[in-house]
Structure formats: C-alpha cells, structure tokens
Image (cartoon, rainbow, N blue to C red):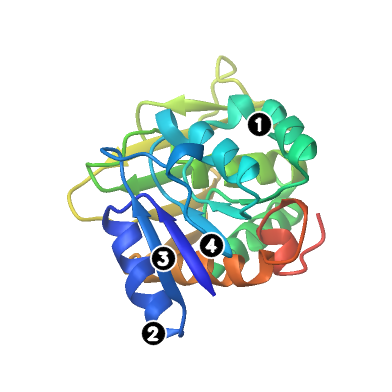
Amino acid sequence: MKILLIGYGKMGQIIEKLANQRGHQIVGKFDSKTPYSTENHVQADVAIEFSCPELALQHINSCFINNIPVVVGTTGWYNEFDQIKQNRIQHNGALFTATNFSLGVNLFFEMGKQLTKIMNGHNYQCNIHEIHHTEKKDAPSGTAITLAENVIKSSSTLNHWELADRVQEFNTHDSQDQNALPIYAERQPNVPGTHILSFESSVDSIKLEHEAKNREGFAIGAIVAAEWLIGKTGVFGMSDLLNFEN
C-alpha cells in the first residue's frame, strides 16, 4: 500500500515507522511548512492526515479532488463537517475520520455506553476527566467529546456537556445543572492521553478509565483504517471498522 503522510509531527513519524514494518510504502510527506494541495499531488493508494485544524479542510478537499481516500486524525474542524460531506459526494471520495483511532479507546467508548445505561435511575452524577500533554491545543479533547456524546445518548437525564474548571464531585445542591455532563480538561507534560468516566454518589464512586501508554495504539489504528478504506466510497468511522452497532 502506497501511503501519503499529511502531517509529519510525532504521530506522523510513528505512523511512518509502523507502516514500514507492516510492509507499506510512504510515497510522500507533507507538514505545515509544505501543506498538501492539488498542486503538489503525489500518486498514492491512501492518505493519512494528522496535521492541525487550520489545514485539515484544505488537505481533505485536496485528497477528494485527487481521488485519494483519506484517513483523518486531526480534530477541531467538525463545524465544517456538513460541507466536507457535500464535497465528498461531489468527488465520490472516501473519508475515514475519528477522534481517536485506538482500539482500546473505542472499546472504552462502548463500555461507557453500557455503563451509563446501567447507571440510569440510580442517583449517580456523571463527569469526565481528561488529561493530555501540554502541547495539545484543543480542550476538551475530541476523545472526551465523543465519550460525552455517547454518554448523553445513553443517559436518561443528561442532554449536554460543559467544560468544567475542576473535577466534579457529588453535589446535592439544587443549583447544579442536573442535565449537564461536566468535562474537566487537564494538561500535564508527557501524557499521551487519559480519560476517566466517573459516576459519583454521596457514598461511593464508580470509575471507568482508559490510559494510553504511548502513541503507537493511535498509529496502528490509523494504519488499519487506511488498509480497510481502500476501494470504498463514503464517510466512515471506527464503528464501521470494528462492526459496532451505532
């Protein structure tokens, strides 16, 4: 498989190493200094895009125009998702996007859905705590937002999430918004990514946690998604790859 790497930071370099180990060929590498566009087209079977929100739309549309299926790990551009979907239809392209490509994280998402359903009606308050490295630009993380959206869909009381300024504990005060899911975003040096889903009561806590030990889990997931995407058209995500029910 011939791979076009769009974004050559830490993730891009790990993807290059692991893709070579799996027998694939990197045929082009682009970064913020030399963004990918229709003018510097490289023949490839698939593109893997881990860049920045400011360039993601240009990269995705350039892949559509050049008829290259694209796997996108960049977050922070989803306000333009409807337009990207229209562009994909216009060019009959293929887009695979996820807030997190780790198999473990996506299993964590599914467990979060099931745990939320079990907890309905038992007087527990839910919150999310995410911790990432200090270089991460967006807060809360895309992974935390996806987790929150899944929890809200499975909850009998929650209908929106909000960014919190501290880890939330059980609160019996009527002033607290019982329909809001708080997300606390923390930044520490050298943390690949930790997400904690907590259910708090006045007597105990129940927690579900995923801790990434390094970035390789994300990179392997992106490569597997690229392998899977070849020959397809449409918009896909990890639930399609892993055959999860939506």
Residue on which the image places disc 3: 27
Q: Earlier in the sequence, mark 4 or mark 3?
A: 3
For the residue marked with disc 2, what is the amino acid?
Answer: Gln
Residue at label 1?
Answer: 81
Q: Are marks 4 and 3 in contact (CB under 8 Å)?
A: yes
- Cβ atoms under marks 2 and 3 closer than 8 Å: no
Q: Nearer the viewer, mark 1 or mark 2?
A: 2
Amino acid type, residue under disc 3 in the picture: Val
Identify the mark nearer the N-term, 4 or 2: 2
Q: Are marks 3 and 1 in contact (CB under 8 Å)?
A: no
Q: Which mark is residue 44?
A: 4
Camera-side residue of 116 and 242: 242
In space, the residues marked 4 and 3 are separated at their CA atoms by 7 Å
> Which residue was labeled with disc 2?
21
Q: Circle 1: is it few (<14), some (14-19), or many (20+) Cα within 10 Å?
A: few
Q: Quadrant of residue 52?
A: top left
Front tag of 4 and 2: 4
Measured Cα–Cα span from mark 2 to mark 3: 15 Å
In which quadrant of the rendered view does residue 214 lie? bottom left
Report whether residue 37 is seen.
no
